[in-house]
Amino acid sequence: MTASATSGTLAGADHTRGVYNFSAGPAALPEAVIRRVQDDIWDIDGSGIGIMEHSHRGPVVDGVWERTEAACRKLANIPDDYAVLYVQGGASTRFSMVPANFLPEGGTADYINTGSWSKKAIKEAKLFGSVNVAGSSEDSNFDHIPANLSYSATPAYLHFTSNNTIFGTEFSAEPSCPDGSFLVCDASSDIFSRPIDVTKYGLIYAGAQKNLGPSGVTLIIMRKDLAERCERTLPSMGMYKTFAANDSRYNTPPVFGVYVMGVVFDWILQNGGLGVMAERNAAKAQLIYDALDSGFYKPHAQVGSRSMMNITFNCPTDDLNKDFLGEAKGHGFDGLKGHRSVGGIRASIYNAFPASGCQALRDFMRDFAQRKG
Ligand SMILES: *Cc1c(COP(=O)(O)O)cnc(C)c1O
């Protein structure tokens, strides 16, 4: 297998469309990726047929599958005893699929409750067994990552959300996993934004539309022994083993989404890999946090829990929030309106979001604070 999902280089960096897209998801993609995809929509690999028009069992898609998996494995250093799978239904379908497969009748799973997505995952798990909330920051509207965790005696697994897209908090490292259990992570909004030690996890899932590609495909990285296991008799499409045994092609997979993910994996590799992504993301986030800490704005996340991906804050008043968002639009900043559970402003700055956009937002924030403060 070649460790490249596409041929040729993915040159160029920043968007040139006159708008900085701060959307939380679906979110900005690298310009070089979009240009490549444009070409391959018309004709991929010189086949005379576009990527959306090929049979999912034909040789061109075989090649896409092989290259995408190889690039993914190289990028995250994924060992052979882990499977790379592509599923549909978003991260949200994993909220029920994980407990359906791995929470036995009468069993308990531990969950860390760090926001809306964790809460939704907990709600679905309760359909299948008991949930022990090992830690929660709900009392302070999810403004931090809880430090003290109390695990149940023998949890089937420990589930956490590595980055809380809505509240703007992020785990700086994996929580320790109780003995005999395994770690399950919803990494939808920070996967591949920094190096990851896959071997610490049983299962990682991520909807593609934040950091990996278009909506419609969800990436799963999971231990192969878990992929063969299932605690219940379930419909075929609800079992991980169906996907693992059929190379994620039991039914018609989201070919286009998988293909774009592969191009994004290549883009990350060609830009230096996950270490470089982490450095760039930290520097990008720092620009905005610096402006945030000037005294005018009210950051939502506590300092030790801040996300490198989603930066959440309010202006001193709701009227000023409105002014900020109105003026921001005039500067070509799109997608900055905060989620209703935090209000105010949210700047989502995933891998593909350019540093120049963070600088532009910082400059605007400083200017706005000076004029209104
Ligand atoms: C966006 C998001 C989800 C929901 O993903 P869907 O693909 O829409 O189901 C779940 N978890 C996290 C952390 C997210 O950011």
Image (spheres, rainbow, N blue to C red):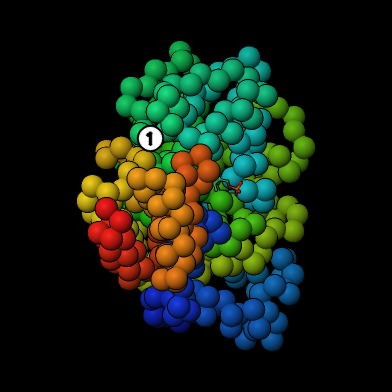
Residue type indicated by callout 1: Asp
**Residue 95 visible somewhere in the drawing:** yes
Does 19 appear above or below 295? below
Write the residue at 39% across / 17% down: 150
Does 356 appear above or below 252? below
Residue 237 quadrant: top right
Give coordinates of residue 62: x percent, y percent. 64, 67
**Residue 3 visible somewhere in the drawing:** no
- Choose between 250 and 265: the one closer to the eye: 265
Write the residue at 38% across / 35% down: 143
Residue 306 quadrant: top left
Instruction: Please tell me whether mark 1 sits on a helix, a strand or a loop.
Output: loop
Left or right? Give the position of 245 relative to 194: right
Left or right? Give the position of 34 relative to 173: right
Left or right? Give the position of 138 relative to 26: left
Left or right? Give the position of 22 relative to 117: left
Write the residue at 57% across / 33% down: 121
- Determine if the C-beta at disc 1 is less than 8 A from ligand 1: no
Numbered disc total: 1
